[in-house]
Each structure stands twice: as structure tokens, then as C-alpha cells.
Image (cartoon, rainbow, N blue to C red):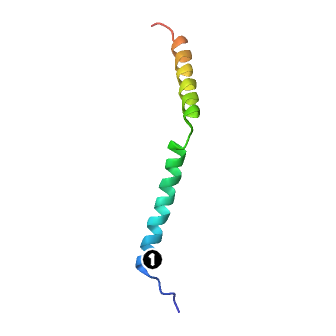
């Protein structure tokens, strides 16, 4: 015999799982300290300057 499933509970469980995934994405995107964000920005700018400095004139 099959198991009876409450559709309301299944729907809510699906929404909870989606919320957990979204929360993990947000933690990865916004959960860094200010110093770490500044360091990443500075490294990116340094890489851009190095790339611009290596360009040849046409």
C-alpha cells in the first residue's frame, strides 16, 4: 500500500528547501567581512592596472 502524503506539507517542505538554497547563496555573496571585500576589490583593481599596463598601442 502506498503512503499518504499531505500536499500542503510537501509544498511547504519544497519552499523551505528553496529558502535554504537562497540563504546559502546570500551568505556566499554578502556574508564576507568588510576587510575581505576591500581586499578582493583592491586585488581586482591591481590586476586591471597590470593588464592595462601590458597593452600595446595599435
Q: Residue furthest bottom?
A: 1
Q: Nearer the viewer, residue 24 or 33?
A: 33
Task: Assign the C terminus to one quadrant of the image.
Answer: top left
Instruction: Kindly state the secondary structure of the residue where label 1 is placed.
Output: helix
Q: Nearer the viewer, residue 34 or 14?
A: 34
Tally of numbered tags: 1
Query: Could you tell me residue 29's position as x and y percent?
Result: 51, 43
Query: Could you tell me residue 16's position as x and y percent?
Result: 47, 65
- The answer to whether residue 44 is above or below residue 32 is above
Write the residue at 48% across / 87% down: 4
Q: Residue furthest front?
A: 34
Write the residue at 40% across / 77% down: 8
Q: Nearer the viewer, residue 43 or 56?
A: 43
Query: Could you tell me residue 6's position as x and y percent?
Result: 44, 82
Please tell me how crowded label 1 is: few (under 14), some (14-19), or many (20+) other residues with Cα within 10 Å: few
Query: Could you tell me residue 43's position as x and y percent?
Result: 58, 25
- The answer to whether residue 14 is above or below residue 41 is below
Write the residue at 51% across / 57% down: 21
- The answer to whether residue 36 is above or below residue 52 is below
Quadrant for residue 40, please give it: top right
Write the residue at 47% across / 60% down: 19
- The answer to whether residue 18 is above or below residue 27 is below
Q: Residue furthest top?
A: 57
| Residue where numbered disc 1 is placed | 9
Amino acid at each position: 500500500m502506498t503512503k499518504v502524503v499531505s500536499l500542503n506539507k510537501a509544498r511547504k517542505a519544497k519552499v523551505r528547501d528553496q529558502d535554504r538554497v537562497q540563504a546559502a547563496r546570500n551568505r556566499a555573496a554578502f556574508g564576507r567581512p568588510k576587510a575581505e571585500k576591500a581586499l578582493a576589490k583592491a586585488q581586482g583593481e591591481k590586476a586591471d592596472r597590470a593588464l592595462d599596463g601590458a597593452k600595446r598601442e595599435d
